[in-house]
Amino acid sequence: QSKDRAMKFFVDTADTNEIKELAATGLIDGVTTNPSLITKSGRDFKEVIAEICDLTDGHVSAEVVATEWEQMVAEGKTLQAIASNVAVKLPLTMDGLRACRELSNMGTAVNVTLCFSANQAL
């Protein structure tokens, strides 16, 4: 089975000490985090994202806080400029999906938050 089709393991945290420890095992493929996890650390959002990006070669999902697609795109560009391995995380809303398409068309790595129900996806 090729590495591209193998399951990937992303750790969901903003704790850089945990990430360092897990990265040393060679078992993580990337990191996903969100603004609330970073806020709990008491540190600057962009600084934490940059540090996490230095700890892994894999994608680091950095979530936008904007709610309208134009602002999501602008924020996504800012986040992606932090490091080449940033993937912009967007909410699964109509605006989020519109921003997803726009950023994807620009070559930015993106992902969307979880979908908990069929109604949410509609």
Image (cartoon, rainbow, N blue to C red):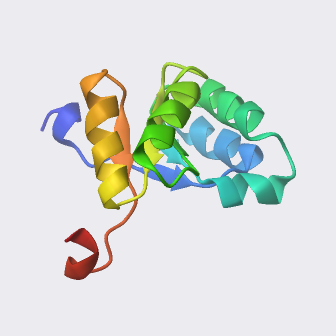
- Along the viewing direction, whichever of 111 and 99 lies nearer the viewer: 99
Q: Quadrant of residue 48?
A: top right
* Left or right for 67, reference 104: right
- Report the residue at 82% width, 53% height from top: 41
* Left or right for 40, reference 102: right
91 shown above or below 99: below
- Along the viewing direction, whichever of 65 and 51 lies nearer the viewer: 65
116 shown above or below 14: below
Quadrant occupied by the C terminus: bottom left
Quadrant occupied by the N terminus: top left
Numbered disc total: 0
* Left or right for 65, reference 108: right
Q: Position of residue 16 (x, y in %)?
A: 73, 43
Residue 22 seen in render: yes
- Report the residue at 55% width, 50% height from top: 66
Q: Position of residue 55 (x, y in %)?
A: 63, 30
Q: Position of residue 112 (x, y in %)?
A: 36, 53
28 shown above or below 38: above
Residue furthest toward the left? 1
Q: Position of residue 87 (x, y in %)?
A: 44, 35
- Along the viewing direction, whichever of 92 and 43 lies nearer the viewer: 92
- Report the residue at 29% width, 50% height from top: 97
- Report the residue at 36% width, 26% height from top: 108
Residue 29 seen in render: no
Q: Quadrant of residue 82?
A: top right
- Along the viewing direction, whichever of 6 and 82 lies nearer the viewer: 82
